[in-house]
Amino acid sequence: MDTSPDSCLDTRTDPGVLRETAREPSQALDPKSPVARFGADAPLPMDSGVMLAPFQIAYQTAGRLNADRSNAVLICHALTGDQHFAHTHPVTGKPGWWETLVGPGKPVDTDRFFVVCSNVIGSCMGSTGPASLNPETGRPYGLDFPLVTIRDMVRAQAMLLDHLGIGDLFLCIGGSMGGMQVLQWAALYPERVFAAMPIATGARHSAQNIAFHEVGRQAIMADPAWADGRYLEAGTRPAKGLGVARMGAHITYLSEAALHRKFGRRFQAGSAPTFSFNADFQIESYLRHQGLSFVERFDANAYLYLTRAMDYFDLAEDHGGVLANAFRGTKTRFCAMSFTSDWLFPTADSRAIVHALNAASAPVAFVEVESDKGHDAFLLDEPAMFSAAKGFIDAAARARGL
Amino acid sequence: MGDAGAPWDAAEALPRSGEVGGARVDHLVVLGLVQPGARVLDIGCGDGTLLALLRDRRGVDGRGIELSREGVNACLARGLSVIQGDADTDLANYPDGAFDVVVLSQTIQATRNPRIVLEHLLRIGRQVIISFPNFGHWRVRAELAFRGRMPVTAMLPEAWYETPNIHHCTIRDFVGLCRLVGAHIEKATALDARGHRMRFSMPWWVWNLIGAQGVFLLRRE
């Protein structure tokens, strides 16, 4: 979801099996980005009933906040994304994950806007999560960390904005799980969001999506190295389980057409099958590489927690079963976007959001972008997405006097 | 309109000339029918020209539906709230009475189910402004009668095998549909082939013969 699927065609890594590694996800404890720390006097009220304290939020920024503090943009990252939206990744060394959309002269123009992106609560790139140390025990939280919801993530982001002296956002934008946060922002803090762009997302997680997540979680928990979630202390890592979870999930981020175009039935080396279970097909090698590279940078327990947060998300259910009620009276201007080949969050999911916004008389625009790249299209070079985003954002900036 | 009991061409507010600020006359007809500050839904809004005109000249709260991504993008760049969708499938999701005025311009003949679309328009909007090419125009009749061919005119420029217009009707046909679905015709007029409003009051059958397009202001009965 946050590694470019285009970057790995040439890999010759043939692991056969996913190897185990005991390497600590150091970014969880000592992230290479600014960190806002909240002490016992500023706990995070979580949906589970827990008042989380102390906790910290790791974030990155680009651009400058103007004198009126009216040009702030919040980027919400996806499931396995992080705060490094326009910054070299500290583990992988890859460029920022949304440099296609965000940067000088880009639709989210860092020459004009002050852009903030924080690692969500429950993740593993510096914000407090299951890989962080529990101050009560001095050990990693593991499964003692409270269950996280999308709303918890948004509350923590709001506290970060308070900390940064940002009252209201000019724009809140994100794809997939980031889009869920955008919707939650608009529902929870409507007066703090001038414009909202939920992309390739839904107002609830479908049964099919929950099912895929459950397969991933079961893969992790079936790995003996997971050690009931205490692998950090045990000095192991459930790399096989997490790798398989990633392989399965990665298929859902692509499309049949994209897989066929990039891999077809081509063999990895030579032209004949090896009559073994080696990675004969390019698609197999690609998926194994995706699994391997993922475990280098992501914490297995964080993956459990964040997939759960998406599963629990149902904005209509939070508002008496009527999605329109989540947006009643809102003045936020919305632009929803979907991709034709996205079967994880299909256009119908975006349309449901748009219909609810219509029913709530909210100003809403909607674009369905033609693309065969599947769900991950929102992270890729999609000129049609950029032109629509630029039109919406520029017009919103004019309306706000930016 | 004769047997419909509605005033034919009684709209005093309608502009009489086609040259007003470079805007299309059919757009100016709509402009003349919309109250300042109204909530307006423009279905098939194209690049948003009409919505922008209504916003800038009437201060309306305008929304749009447009099929083409190019059109939606142009609307976004104008700061308009337009969703990519189509009249046949998306109208069902709008609540009753959501808009003061719903505009359907030169589109009803291209919908799969004009009757259901019209019923939705009357449900969603307090008023409905609808325009369509008149298949009863004398040129159309002449093409069929004397050349024996499906007409290709200024209003209907595509050949039969590639036209998006699958449900042609005449002005008289449309009046019949209005009666069928319980639409009250508040005002009606016809525009000539250049989009100019026809100047003189005439019996309805004359309009049906020489009007290139019909423009109706409807209300639920």
Image: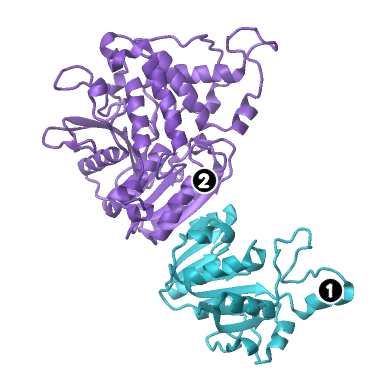
Residue A258 badge: none
Q: Is residue A322 above or below residue B31?
A: above
Q: From the viewer's perspective, is A67 left or right of B30?
A: left
Towards the viewer: A328 or A59: A328
On the image, the x and y values in percent for residue A200 come to 47, 42
Task: Tell me which amino acid carries mark 2.
Answer: Thr
Tell me the subunit letter for badge 1.
B
Instruction: Calculate the distance from the C-alpha at mark 1 to the C-alpha at mark 2.
Output: 43 Å
- Residue A224: quadrant of the picture: top left
Q: Which residue is mark 2?
A: A347
Residue at position x 58%, y 66% in the image: B116
Q: Is residue A317 above or below residue B92?
A: above
Q: Colour of chain A?
A: purple
On the image, the x and y values in percent for residue A144 come to 22, 23
Q: Are marks 1 and 2 in contact (CB under 8 Å)?
A: no
On the image, the x and y values in percent for residue B130 come to 58, 74
Q: Which residue is mark 1?
A: B144
Crowd band around label 2 with a 10 angstrom C-alpha radius: few (<14), some (14–19), many (20+): many
Any part of residue B71 in sight: yes
Q: Is residue B101 above or below residue A93?
A: below
Task: Tell me which amino acid carries mark 1.
Answer: Leu
Q: From the viewer's perspective, is A62 left or right of B135?
A: left
Chain letter of the cyan region: B
Towards the viewer: B133 or A226: A226
Q: Secondary structure at mark 1?
A: helix
Residue farthest left in this picture: A41
Tell me the subunit letter for badge 2.
A
Towards the viewer: A170 or A159: A159
Any part of residue A30 in sight: no
